[in-house]
Image (cartoon, rainbow, N blue to C red):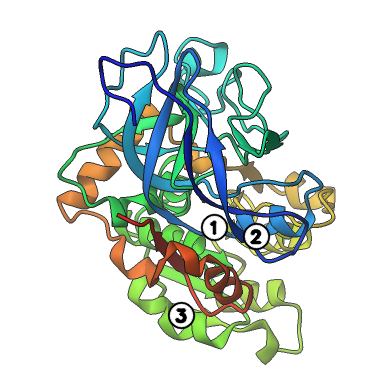
Amino acid sequence: MSSSTSTPQVITCKAAVAWGAGEPLVIEEVQVSPPQPMEIRVKVVCTSLCRSDISAWESHPIFPRIFGHEASGIVESVGLGVTEFKEGDHVLTVFIGECMECKPCTSGKSNVCQVLGLERNGLMHSDQKTRFSIKGKPVYHYCGVSSFSEYTVVHSGCAVKVSPNAPLEKICLLSCGVAAGLGAAWNVADVSKGSTVVIFGLGTVGLSVAQGAKLKGASRIIGVDNNPQKCENAKAFGITEVVDPNSYEEPIAQVINRITDGGADFSFECVGDTDMITTALQSCCDGWGLTVTLGVPKVKPVMSAHYGLLLMGRTLKGSMFGGWKPKSDLPSLVDKYVNKEIQIDDYITHNLQFDEINKAFTLMREGKCLRCVMHMPR
């Protein structure tokens, strides 16, 4: 273990390694390299399972790999040039970074950093290499985070220092799902008071959109999902009424248009299905209807919609991490949670030990959880 006066060494620790698409994760001993310049090594305290972890695990071709990106931890060591962090700092990991210097970062118009954007190749941003290995052979990263490991290395631009008073086992959800939903309602859509909102998909992201819309004063928040268990619990998060597509013979967009007298003011696609994006667009009103898509499609990435939907004044917007700039904005979200201005706890349906990680995958695939938080060994 390193100290402030010593050079960080390779750490051997346990990680949940995916060896192939859809195969159960295996708890393996992995070697974690020291942080390179502008990187930090983090002792993961808690990590939660996000739907995009499952989608990538089921379909991406890059293996062996350590998934996980929604996490909280404590800085164990820092690489050369890192001045923002020191050992012992509490942090959230983030799947898109903020370099604070590139065109998008300085524009005030975007949170999609050119330097530390979404990493898709299983490598580190800085040198296109891995920091994990097993018996000298590389193990690939996921989204530049890889939190399904007791220790991980991230670029210092992909971590956010947070208050040591905030509970790490709760705020890990702010490093992706809950923040993404709140931001879609607040930053991307800017939901207006008294408006009608429809949300397709009542997982953690969709229900976080609901919380955000409720806090913005939306008067009607309609949730659409075909999972009865999710529908049953949705009202606790701000959903005012639930629509199950299986209960209707007519297309669900027609149902929404009928019960909202011409369509919702705002619609949110939180499923990860390009056909559902079209449905969401059809479900908002002419003139000013705004559709926001947050989901990551598992198949069929190309969407199609009749041009007339846009010609009549509807708008379609994409939302990456709810428009939040991680370093600039996440600390204030953590403070809102500490001050009880937003809720996180109710999204956590299961607390599991790290070695139960495959149970978390099963629960999410079967639609029996919102967020499973995995607790690392002390």
In the rendered image, residue 20, in percent from the top left (x then y), is placed at: 77, 56
Q: Is residue 115 left or right of residue 46?
A: right
The residue singled out by tag 1 in the image is 50
Q: Secondary structure at mark 2?
A: helix
Give the residue type at disc 2: Ile
Task: Name above or below for residue 249 compared with residue 323.
Answer: below
The numbered mark, 3 or 2, whose residue comes first in the sequence reads 2
At a point 44% along the width and 47% down the height, the residue shown is 150
Helix, strand or loop at mark 3:
strand
- Numbered circles on residues, count: 3
Q: Is residue 5 above or below residue 88?
A: above
Q: Amino acid at mark 1?
A: Cys
Residue underneath mark 3: 241
Left or right: 262 with respect to 64? Answer: left
Percent coordinates x, y for residue 376 in the rendering:
38, 56
**Residue 29 at x, y = what percent?**
55, 49
Question: Which label's residue is closer to the chain start, 1 or 3?
Answer: 1
Q: Quadrant of the N terminus?
A: top left
Measuring 22% from the left and 47% from the top, which residue is drawn there? 336
Q: Mark yes or no: residue 238 visible.
A: no
Q: Amino acid at mark 3?
A: Glu
CA separation in Å, label 1 and label 3: 25 Å
